[in-house]
Image (cartoon, grey):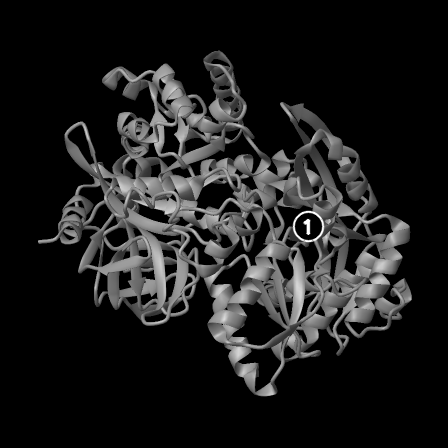
Amino acid sequence: MGRREEMIEKIKELMTQPERIRNMGIAAHIDHGKTTLSDNLLAGAGMISEELAGKQLVLDFDEQEQARGITINSANVSMVHNYDGSDYLINLIDTPGHVDFGGDVTRAMRAIDGAIIVVDAVEGVMPQTETVLRQALREYVKPVLFINKVDRLIKELKLGPQDILNRFAKVITDVNRLIKKYAPKEFRNEWLVKVEDGSVAFGSAYYNWALSVPYMKKTGVSFKDIVELTNSGDLKTLRKKAPLHVVVLDMVVKHLPNPLQAQKYRIPHLWRGDVNSDIGQAMMKCDPKGPMTMVVTKIILDKHAGEVATGRVWSGTVKTGQEVYLISAKRKARIQQVGIYMGPERINIEAVPAGNIVAVTGLRDAMAGETVSQMEIEPFEALHYASEPVVTVAIEAKNVKDLPKLVTALRELAKEDPTLHVKIDEETGQHLLSGMGELHLEVKLVKLKEDWKLEVDVSEPIVVYRESVSRQSPIVEGKSPNKHNRFYITVEPLPDEIYEAIHEGEIPEGRPKNPKEVAKKLAELGMDYEVAKGIVDVYQGNIFLDNTKGIQYLNEVMDLLVDGFHQAMDEGPLAKEPVMKVMVRLHDAKIHEDNVHRGPAQIYPAIRTAIHCAMMKANPILYEPYQKVIINLPYEYMGAASREINQRRGQLIDMRQEGEVMIIIAEAPVAEMFGFAGAIRGATSGRALWSTEHAGFKRVPGELAVNIIRQIRQRKGLDPNPPKEQDVCPQQ
């Protein structure tokens, strides 16, 4: 039996012992060394050669990842680690650090119970570190800290031991400040990372060494030894004395929870159903004999096997041939193959019990976030993404005969990456692809060309704006075309606190399952409770309320009213852009008793026109997406970088010096940031390192808004002149 076969047998044996399993991820700011760390952990587990570790970047097996030197997709691998004489199964997910791929981080966090947060010792805690840590804590994932690139402090910055320890102290303080801010209340203190208990390790993933206090005590290796060996360049001895994989995986086994512990507190938070029901208890106890339930966290398209769904098994056992139910898609499917990952390789096995991460085929058209079970249960919480698609390109096939293939390819891309939005514009025949940023779209377009062999024309990137209102409207009457149904509504701006609560997932999107609870939450955030009680629907950061009293037949048309509200929010009156931060209230209605006279053809136009007319009377405004820009560069280029930001309607928020490096933090509209990469490279002779992250939406200044509305309308083939109130409101 070869080494690989032995390992697979060992993994199979450990899979059935949940107390010996650790599901963990590695998350960090871009370029802080996550994938290099993952490589070394694999090498330590005997999966790749030690010489290649850190250079091979095994988990970046996508060709583009290797070409760009960044991680785009999260990758999975299972390995075995021996700690204190016992073997443990480590299921590892390496996640991307670039903000454009943050969706992958969110999905990975659902599958794991613990995360190693990697921080570059030189750069310290960066904005994206905060984003990934917040995503982890929101999913009840416990963090430990690895401070990487310590060799640079010794070799490049020539810091003495005391200065290095001060640098560590600052990183630990910054990470703990974020844990205190974002961790669930009950874990705020318990989850803080500490040097003395070994929940912090430090080292160099590139040179394959690491240290932690428990390891120093156990082996007698001191930090002084490390400094001497680094300076003398004896890396072989260094790796032997303080092997990275041993120190880091010891920390994982000791400090990160096993599925039995984690599911007790994660299930009540992530799952909406009754935790005292049979299925609730099976998941809380991670029971392999309970009904099988898993959540899909990723879809990969395999040329041979078709769609492979990766997911976390919460209860029961996933088996080949099992019939299952996709809860959100409301249909049955049959599991064809069951397997686990060993890096790029998928090993087929017969069954995978609760508490593990599994790869299955047969769940045709499942989306990431889908709940899969053997019985109909409440679905798991929807996945909340840290940012939203703000950049769009229009794509057309160069050859008309490729059109069906293009439609298929775009659908498949959106399935693999739910943060990518695909819209097929029936009127113009254009295919619109929206992503998190320029890089996100660039990577997907390369996939279209290489994987699908498609030749496409791509438009210049465009920004999706949002429409809203700035004051309350008077009551507006909406009449159905047959004049038999009338609705009386107002619109007003949604307060920031409520919009934030929707964005953070505290108020769930969709029809509330428990309207009283949502109304209570709205009242806590400042809405009048009597008004809040009418909550009917939450859609893309907008709210629909029914504040009528005893209207006959209203219940029978409510679904149509909600659909009409969605249509009105998808395309606002100014430029047919999506609507945000609007509260629509229904005050009164007259509805025809015969249902023939109150079908969709009557109700949709009545409610849609009423909402748009009310918006025109409430001083409609335009919002645009903003990006936060973080630039690291030498002091002498500061002026050039500031000018670049100012020319793009940007504002400087903070400037600070750390050693030789200046850090500039600014905010700028996404629309002005196209081509920024080339410009900043030119302005700083390529010496600037920079990253961006989504910074929400801000109101477009009045004089600019008129021109932008003109441009959008022209692009969409509408009359370029912005509409006036009388164009939108029906003449009474």
| Image height of 45 relative to 569, above or below | above
Residue shown at the point (38%, 43%) measured from the top left: 54
Q: Quarter of the image containing the N terminus?
A: bottom left
Q: Quadrant of residue 566?
A: bottom right
Answer whether residue 729 is visible to the viewer in this image.
no
> Which percent across, then down, holds residue 686?
67, 44
Q: Quarter of the image containing the C terminus?
A: bottom right
Number of numbered discs visible in the structure rendering? 1
| Image height of 673 relative to 84, above or below | below
Instruction: Tell me: 557 left or right of 463.
Output: left
> Which percent across, then down, holds residue 38?
37, 42
Q: Nearer the viewer, residue 652 or 243?
A: 243
Please identify the residue farthest to the top as the structure is shown.
Answer: 162
Instruction: Tell me: 174 left or right of 636.
Output: left
- Local crowd at mark 1 within 10 Å, few (<14), some, or many (≥20)? some
Q: Quadrant of residue 370?
A: bottom left
Q: Which residue is mark 1?
A: 677
Please identify the residue farthest to the left as the structure is shown.
Answer: 1
Residue type of the residue flagged with mark 1: Ala
| Image height of 352 relative to 265, above or below | below
Answer whether residue 475 is visible to the viewer in this image.
yes
Q: Nearer the viewer, residue 350 or 663?
A: 663
